[in-house]
Image (cartoon, helix red, strand yellow):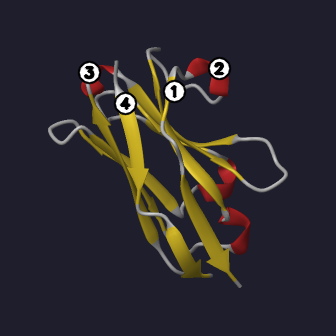
């Protein structure tokens, strides 16, 4: 079974950038669709971005389009989330997740493996 570990979170000023990484171990990483979700205080966890196993197809929630980029390196068993032009509203715990489906899902129930999360805090 694949295990996921996120890293790269931290405190950044509005307008700044962070790159999150999610390292996978223990399974066939390249066969999974990967997604990033986030959960802000007092809110439900929401989909942020997803990428197919090949990396050729990506999908983003509207609020991060043009600012965030998801990518993956199957040789390193790692998926990334490059976050630019960060806003205070991006403050949340960010989770990576793996889905066994063939398409990029936007619902939590479509993802079967989750990391522990990494905190991103954007100050104004």
Q: Residue at x 58, y 65 (%)?
A: 120
Q: Is residue 14 above or below residue 25?
A: below
- 4 or 2: tag closer to the N-terminus: 4
Circle nearer the viewer, 3 or 2: 3
Q: Nearer the viewer, residue 81 or 2?
A: 2
Circle nearer the viewer, 3 or 1: 3
The quarter of the picture where residue 76 lies is: top left
Instruction: Please provide percent x and percent y for residue 1.
Output: 34, 18
- 3 or 2: tag closer to the N-terminus: 3
Tell me the distance, in whole angstroms, between the alpha carbons under discs 4 and 3.
Answer: 8 Å
Residue marked by disc 4: 3
Instruction: Please provide percent x and percent y for residue 35.
Output: 49, 36
Q: Residue at x 32, y 35 (%)?
A: 56
Are the residues flagged by discs 4 and 3 in contact, CB closer than 8 Å?
yes
Q: How many marks?
A: 4
- 3 or 1: tag closer to the N-terminus: 3
Q: Residue at x 31, y 36 (%)?
A: 24
- In the picture, the disc for residue 109 is 2
Residue marked by disc 3: 27
Whether residue 15 is visible here, answered yes or no, is no
Residue marked by disc 1: 104
**Taking 59 as reference, is 6 left or right?**
left
Label 3 secondary element:
loop
Instruction: Please provide percent x and percent y for residue 123.
Output: 67, 81
């Amino acid at each position: 079974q694949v295990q996921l570990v996120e890293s790269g979170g931290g405190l950044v000023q509005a307008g700044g950038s962070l790159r999150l990484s999610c390292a996978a171990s223990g399974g066939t990483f390249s066969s999974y669709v990967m997604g990033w979700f986030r959960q802000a205080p007092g809110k439900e966890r929401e989909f942020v971005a997803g990428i197919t196993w090949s990396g050729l197809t990506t999908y983003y929630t509207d609020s991060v389009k043009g600012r965030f980029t998801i990518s993956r390196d199957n040789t390193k068993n790692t998926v990334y989330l490059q976050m630019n032009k960060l806003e205070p509203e991006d403050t949340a715990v960010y989770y990576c997740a793996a889905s066994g489906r063939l398409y990029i899902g936007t619902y939590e129930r479509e993802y079967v493996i989750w990391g522990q999360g990494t905190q991103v805090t954007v100050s104004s």
